[in-house]
Image: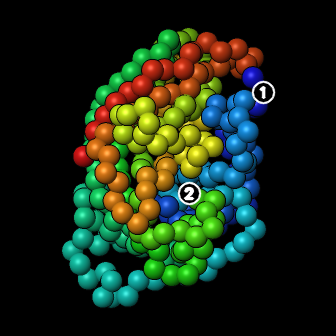
Amino acid sequence: MSLSRTALVMGLGLSCLLVGLSGCQQKAQQSSTSFKNSSASSHHYQAKKPDAAISQSSSHQFNQNFHPTKAQTKSRHYVQTGALTQTGQYTYDSVGTKLTLAQVHHPQTTIKSGAFTYRLTTVRLIRNVAETTDAKKMAAQALNLSTVKSPYYTLQVKFTITNHRHQDLTTDGIRGIRLGTSAKAPLLTAATQLSDASAGKTVPANSSLNTYATGLASQQTAPTFNRIKIAFAGAYTAKQRQVVAPSGWLTTKIN
């Protein structure tokens, strides 16, 4: 393979919030199968933890001292911790982005490829409204856009990888997420605004790994798709030998 199958290297950065798309700045190197044999730009982003803000390498600093007013938090749907579990719940991050859970689904569907079984556990759609200048700048930078058109929507998927082999294996993460079931539907990959935290992670022998990915679903208007397709890349031994082939497509609804 022409590129390393290691996870994105985390560098100096700003703090990551719990929900949405607006937050941490990091230094990173190319990773994941979507970059192999590709001429894609190295501008990409990574979620540091589930439901976290996406990021792109940059030295630009942003003011992260935003605090919502009492009027902004008086609704019973406001969640101070940022852990959004029910549609309609919202929170604010430290740069002034309002994040609202628009849709959530817990499919529990699986697909198998060789020694790996993938279980898709949660699919969420987050509505993001950048309410400050820094929030808009940070989102645009993270998405590699000149400007961001607010509101913008992020798709978050959580999944479990089970390794049935008697040796540790390294996953190359997600091959792609198609926003719809049509072959012409937009495709998210590591080169096209998909943040894949699973890429380069080791799945222990006879064990499981819980992980996630975040990508841009749309800008200004709510997405119109109600189903997505997700395909996973291969997995490798410590000696870089592929022992798990890429999976087929797993289809699920998002609400």
Q: Earlier in the sequence, mark 2 or mark 1?
A: 1
Residue 80 location (% of width, % of height):
36, 72
Q: What residue type is labelled 2?
A: Ile
> Residue 10 placed where, x, y %?
70, 51
Q: In this view, does 215 lie above or below 234?
A: below
Residue 143 relative to residue 41: left or right: left
Give how far across and how far down residue 134 sits, in percent: 58, 78
* Residue 24 visible to an observer of this rendering: no
Is residue 31 at all visible to an observer of this figure?
yes
Q: Mark 1 points at which residue?
A: 2
Residue 100 sits in quarter? bottom left
Say which residue appears at 60% left-offset and 73% top-offset: 137
Residue 140, compared with residue 35, is above or below; it is below
Residue furthest to the front:
184
Question: Of tags 2 and 1, which is closer to the observer?
Answer: 1
Q: Name the residue under label 2.
A: 54
Residue 67 higher or lower than 44, as above or below: below
| Residue at figure coordinates x 47%, y 74% from the top left | 130
